[in-house]
Image (cartoon, rainbow, N blue to C red):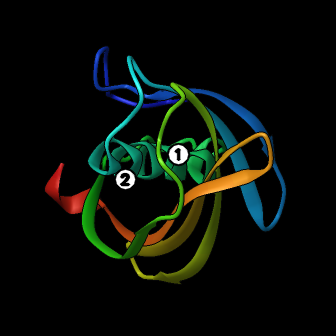
Amino acid sequence: MKLPHQEPIRFVKELLEIDAEYAFVSCIFPHPPTLAMVCEAAAQSSAAFAQDDKNITMGFLVSLKDIELLNNLVYDNYIIKIKREMVFGSMSEFRFELLNNSTIYATGNLVIALQDENSK
């Protein structure tokens, strides 16, 4: 995936699957993640929806809401299932689930704003 992040803050490893509704992204953490690391990985995973875009644009995490930890984070490998819920101009809202072996560990919503073409 096209991301500016480098180790140790790049958690997204591979786009596993994408269709019209959802993207499934493999994430590997250096140790069992904190909820903040999960939110960052979800934001990175949102880039799956821009992989066909020829114009590489920088995205910025602008808000988080309804973030829930449902199970203790004990693994370092997870799958993020992410869905683009809404697009409004340069901003998109996403809903994500953090999964391991079909168990949901965390959920939430986030908003990503894409850099304005005129501000490059």
The residue that appears at 47% across and 70% down in the rendered structure is 108
Provide the secondary structure element on which disc 2 rests: helix
Name which quarter of the figure residue 68 lies in: bottom left
* Marked residue nearer the N-terminal end (2 or 1): 2
Residue 73, relative to residue 3: is it above or below? below
Q: Is residue 89 left or right of residue 60?
A: right
Residue 116 x/y as whole percent = 26, 63
Instruction: Report the amino acid beneath label 1.
Output: Ser
Name which quarter of the figure residue 32 lies in: top left
Provide the secondary structure element on which disc 1 rests: helix
User: What is the number of the mark on residue 39?
Assistant: 2
The alpha-carbon separation of the residues under discs 2 and 1 comes to 10 Å
Residue 20 x/y as whole percent = 82, 65
The residue that appears at 33% across and 51% down in the rendered structure is 35
Crowd rating for badge 2 (residues with CA inside 10 Å; few <14, some 14–19, many 20+): many
Q: Is residue 2 left or right of residue 79?
A: left
Kindly report which numbered mark, 2 or 1, lies closer to the viewer in this rendering.
2
Residue 11, relative to residue 92: is it above or below? above
Residue 68, relative to residue 35: is it above or below? below
Q: Is residue 24 visible?
A: yes
Residue 41, relative to residue 68: is it above or below? above
User: What is the number of the mark on residue 45?
Assistant: 1
